[in-house]
Image (cartoon, rainbow, N blue to C red):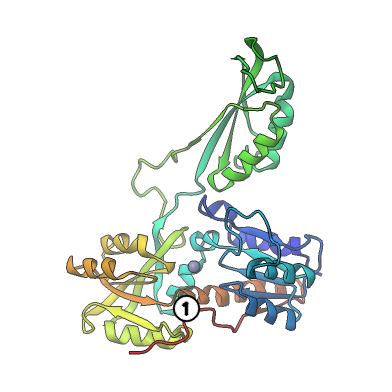
Amino acid sequence: MATVKDLVAWIEEQFPPALAESWDAVGLVCGRPTASVRSVRLTVDVTPEVVADAIADGVDFILAHHPVLLGGVTSVAPDDHKGQMIHDLIENRIALYVAHTSADSSNPGVSDALGALLGITEMSPLEPVSGIELDKVTVFVPTSHVQPVLNALAAAGAGTMGNYERCAYLVDGVGTFLPLAGADPHIGQVGVVEEVAEQRLEMVLARSQRTAIVTALLAAHPYEEPAFDIVELVSADSHVQGTGVGGVGAQGLGRIGELPEPISLRDFAEMASQRLPTTHHGVRVAGDLDRLVRTIAVCGGSGDSLLGTANAARADLFVTADLKHHRVSEHLADDGCAIVDVAHFASEFPWCEQTAAILQRSLVESGDTVTVTVSTLVTDPWAAHLS
Ligand SMILES: [Zn+2]
């Protein structure tokens, strides 16, 4: 029988955490890795209603798109809805995994699912990633503690290059410092200049792992104030145009592709409203309703930051969510492409169905009897739309 650990491994192959944005929080939120899984549920949002539904249906693994806990969490006490949900999940032995921007940039991913539902083919990323974005950490460690620090950084994910792990570069040097009053130095004493045999330790890391690596470094380093720095690395082929980044099948944010035939903006919007889940937000359209559209850019979720990119890529139309008044009116005044603005939830819901189908197929092929379902709850927060 599949376990939580098996599901996490499958998810992270489909949606590599290294593709997530550095500010994001993807991964397993709760659930014991060894626990058995018989029923998986996909959802865009984790809400109290979604959790109650999962409990009632005997679900034991939720794969969600939006994070529940994102930065600055110091408590999951059940005195707000998030703390209550975390308690409900753990008490009912339901694991929760979040695939957020890792699912946005992977292929297939959130925007592929939206584009496919809208009949768009030959899709390539609007903003391709040329691979996993890397940082490099440099830390100065007393020679006696180099191996424990190196091991801790490797355990947190640093130093992985191709088929090699624990890759590091070490060079000898001397560190010097003067502990001031109030300091509690690991080596030396207050008021005395100290010189220590140290090594400069360098390791690469995926940018999305930065927080975990710094946490591991601070925990393993013996000094009160470890000296370290992190720099962002530039891809070796980033100066060469068209060297395999982008294109059909590539990873990255948003998608751009073609409809089989040009259709009017009005007909496209009508088709979108029929194919996407029904919400009170509905489908809003900006631009000449009679203009023909064929090259379509999409971005599941809040795609404001890709509006200019879609326009520069000569899209006839950009389909996304959460666009604001001034942004749209100024874009149109500058002869920008047409816009279809749908509910944030609706734009990402197709990912649930796409992922559920791929996961179910994969589980059947491996002989597992896990059932995979998609939440039928509409988590769009709006309750009415009057006009
Ligand atoms: Zn979203």
Left or right: 141 with respect to 125? Answer: right
Residue 277 on image: x %, y %: 48, 84
The answer to whether residue 164 is left or right of residue 1 is left
For the residue labelled by badge 1, is the local secondary structure a helix, a strand or a loop? helix
In this rendered view, identify the residue nearer to me: 140 or 104.
140
Can residue 360 be seen from the camera position used here?
A: yes
Q: Is residue 159 left or right of residue 253?
A: right
Give the answer, above or below, for where 37 lies relative to 281.
Answer: above
Establish whether ligand 1 lies closer than 8 Å to the Cβ of label 1.
no
Residue placed at 46% from the left, 84% from the top?
279
Q: Which residue is mark 1?
A: 346
Q: Position of residue 198 (x, y in %)?
A: 65, 18
Q: Position of residue 321 (x, y in %)?
A: 40, 72
The residue that appears at 58% across and 40% down in the rendered structure is 205
Regarding residue 160, the answer to whether it shows in the image is no
Quarter the C terminus occupies: bottom left
Where 277 sits versus 182, above or below? Answer: below
Image height of 335 relative to 148, above or below? below
Residue visible at 69% across and 23% down in the picture: 184
Q: How many marks?
A: 1
Nearer to the camera, 106 or 139? 139
The quarter in which the N terminus is drawn is bottom right
Kind of residue sitting beneath label 1: Ala
Dot 1: few (<14), some (14–19), or many (≥20) neighbours within 10 Å?
Answer: many
Which is nearer the eye, 176 or 300?
A: 176
- Quarter of the image for residue 10 reads bottom right
Q: What is the quadrant of residue 304 in the picture? A: bottom left
**Residue 311 location in percent, x, y?**
27, 64
